[in-house]
Amino acid sequence: MGVRFAPQVEGDDAPYTLVVGGSPVVLDAAALALLARGCPRVVAVDRGLDALIDAGVTCDLFCGDADSVGARGQSLVDRALTGDSGFIRDVERYDPRKDFTDLALALRAVRERWGDVPLLCTSLSGGRTDHELAALGCLLSWRGRIAWEEPSFSGRLLRSGDAWDLTGLAGSTFSFVCLSPEASLSERGMAWPLDHRRVRLLEDLGISNVLRDDAVIACHEGSVMAFCLHSAE
């Protein structure tokens, strides 16, 4: 199964900043290196640094308390803190006894340096529902565009005026979940199309649709997270 990330969301010309989270569920090294290609900045969130090391992708910013980073990563963080920027250019290291997640603090660090740039995220979904919901909450507060790529799915956070073109993925399972009190959206090129349909927070209407040719989802109001599931190959 290859990475299905397309580098642009419709209407967006800005390049993505890659954010690699600390989930133990990671893309393989080749797929992660492919994601990093074309991203002008790469951010590691704690154990995400280990995945970047395996992929041979240098890191512009490391954010985390380093409590789950392996020995190689720990050494690189320590070296970066002493001025050796061979693999990591910048470091924000946090006290493990903190009130916020590493991801929330990493997003704050990205915003302080580069603003609400478009984000391409991976390794945020680690098999724990609480972590996934917390990650969604962090992403929902981001004002820029967001794409999410995991081994099992490609995702987009869509807000009012956003659309996702899913051409070339006929037969794939597709779902969306409303993340705002209400949202309005349209789907075409799917087994069960919608036209300016209003949905409620976490309503299950959008689960398990099937893509046809030239499929598109468009968000007219509110916020939704859309998922194209990867079939096992």
Image: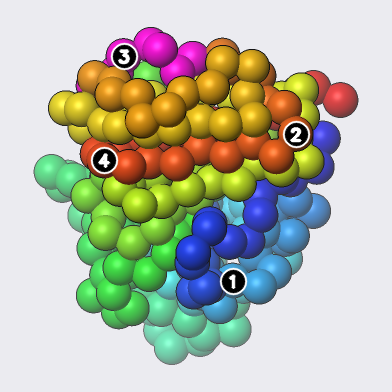
**Neighbour class for label 2 at 10 Å: few (<14), some, many (≥20)?**
some
**Disc 1, SS:** loop
Relative to 90, residue 94 above or below: above
Q: CA distance from mark 3 to mark 2?
A: 26 Å
Q: CA distance from mark 1 to mark 3?
A: 34 Å
Q: CA distance from mark 4 to mark 2?
A: 25 Å
**Disc 3, SS:** loop
Question: Magenta segment, which residues?
Answer: 201-207
- Left or right for 89, reference 54: left
Q: Residue at x 30, y 68 (%)?
A: 116
**Neighbour class for label 4 at 10 Å: few (<14), some, many (≥20)?**
some
Which residue corresponds to mark 4? 221
Amino acid type for the residue under numbered disc 3 = Glu
Which residue corresponds to mark 1? 39
Amino acid type for the residue under numbered disc 1 = Cys
Q: CA distance from mark 4 to mark 3?
A: 15 Å
In the rendered structure, find residue 203 and report the number of the disc placed on it.
3
Q: Residue at x 53, y 58 (%)?
A: 10
- Left or right for 48, reference 211: left
In the rendered structure, find residue 213 and report the number of the disc placed on it.
2
- In front: mark 3 or mark 2? 2
Farthest residue, direction front: 195
Residue 28 found in image quarter = top right
- Which badge, 1 or 2, comes first in the chain's sequence? 1
Residue 180 found in image quarter = top left
Q: Residue at x 69, y 69 (%)?
A: 37
- Which badge, 1 or 3, comes first in the chain's sequence? 1
Residue 174 found in image quarter = top right
- In front: mark 4 or mark 3? 4
Q: Can you see residue 215?
A: yes
